[in-house]
Image (cartoon, rainbow, N blue to C red):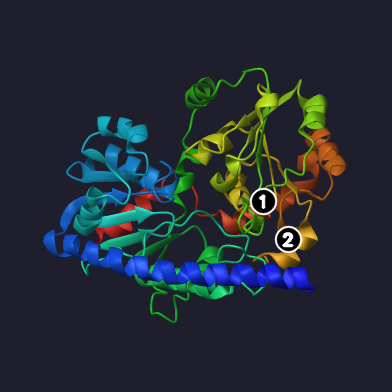
Amino acid sequence: MNKVRQYTVDVIRKSVLLRELATSTRTKLLKANYMKFYRKYKVDDKLCVFEAFNGRKYCDSPKYIYLEMLNNKEYKDFKFIWAFKDPEKFKFLENNKNTKVVKYDSDEYKKAYASAKYWFTPSRLPDYIVPKQNQNYVQCWHGTPLKRLGFDIEVKGKNAIHTVKEWTRLYEYDAKRYKYMVSPSRFVTEKYISAFNLKKIGKDNCILETGYPRNDILFSYDQKYVKKLKEELNIPEDKKIILYAPTWRDDQYKVGTGYSYNLALDFDRFKKLFGKEYIVLFRTHYLVAEIIDLSKYEGFIYNVSDYSDINDLYILADMIITDYSSVFFDYANLKRPMLFYMYDLEDYKNNARDFYIDLDELPGPIVESEEDLYKEIKNINNYWKKYKTKYELFNKRFNYLDDKDSSKRVLKEIIKND
């Protein structure tokens, strides 16, 4: 390792250690404050609290579990609380029966968690929230993992946000609070057990293999729903749709500068080649979405990074282009073409995170250059001749439990049998 790189690594490590210390101190203070709510409020057996990605979105499995409860008379006596960073943006939910919206991390938020019998989220909850013995933290997680998670991450040295020690602490701490964890397959169950250290902490029996509630809509939408989505996003009816959803790269970060992003596509050329036939829905991580200016491609590229529910984008897309993002596991339920644009494959695999599966299992072409990507798009009509059998095997291994009723099965397990 050269001196400049070593210095950069040392600076990052010191920055991470200082952040860990500050986070630990802050968590202790927040936990002390939360305990006031913990002691004051009794658990309401008919109250559920929902959040997604620290209150940023209305989406994922919590959304579809909520909708199932809202529309099923068996849960007509239940009350629902949704937490958002920007609650005004989601006030429309209060038009639904027995539903309240609160501000993330507010006193109302803490009261909700201290009172609700059931907690639903697809991501980690704040460390200061502590469940009572008769409360149920239902971790829905946010997809079938391709990249290694938690305790399964090998030391690569380029992750800018967390050291491996911090990763494992966060995963294990969260897992100790789980009553249930939702899984879509035996494959995912095995990865959860190792990545979250579930066996060691005595939680390996908390997993419910039910299919992902987040994918219920992929089996139940209709053309009326598609039409509504196109009108909402102002998408023309006469164009086919490509969803471009590259993964979040947590190593593209510089101390003092922040996140960077390499598009790895010449959108001018992309538009010239495909603009008459296609439009592109561009979806990237919220941490980098704001630094990308796509205004010159208005009418061709739609930046949908802030759109809450990615399932709607799946439904609209005639094909998906991705790389190492787990989006393709869910999208495969629709049985539509998938292209894997891995322009930095060797670097990513060797210096970021390794994978849980052999990339040869992917039901579509892996391309490492723009030219090859364009060729695959032009020849998309030949896709099924090459990948039909591989696609079927892929779904049999990873998506065999997904259907329109996963939410029903989750609720049966955690509420009807409680």
Of 2 and 332, nearer the camera is 2
User: At x 52% / y 72%, what residue is drawn?
Assistant: 17
**Residue 243 position by quadrant:** top right
Is residue 130 something that shows in the picture?
no
Q: Residue at x 41, y 49 (%)?
A: 52
Relative to 218, is 408 above or below? below
Look at the picture and state if 308 lies above or below 159: above
| Residue 181 as seen in the image, left or right of residue 107 | right
The front one of 154 and 218 is 154
On-image quarter of the C terminus: bottom left
Q: Which residue is mark 2?
A: 348
Query: Is 161 situated left or right of 94 in this image?
Result: right
> Residue 257: x and y, percent?
62, 52
At label 1, the amino acid type is: Glu
In this view of the protein, can residue 21 be seen by the observer? yes
Q: CA distance from mark 1 to mark 2?
A: 28 Å
Q: Is residue 99 above or below residue 125?
A: above
Tag 2 secondary structure: helix
Residue 152 at x, y percent in the picture: 58, 73
Q: Is residue 66 left or right of residue 276?
A: left
Q: Amino acid at mark 2?
A: Tyr
The image quadrant where one finds the N terminus is bottom right
Mark with earlier residue (1, 2): 2
What kind of element bears circle 1? helix
Q: Which residue in the structure is indicated by mark 1?
A: 392
Residue 280: where, in percent of width, then height? Answer: 67, 31
- Give the quadrant of residue 127: bottom left
Q: Position of residue 374 (x, y in %)?
A: 83, 37
Q: Few, some or many C-alpha atoms within 10 Å of disc 2 (few <14, some 14-19, many ≥20)?
A: some
Q: Nearer the viewer, residue 80 or 76?
A: 80
Residue that appears at 21% across and 59% down: 114
Q: Are marks 1 and 2 in contact (CB under 8 Å)?
A: no
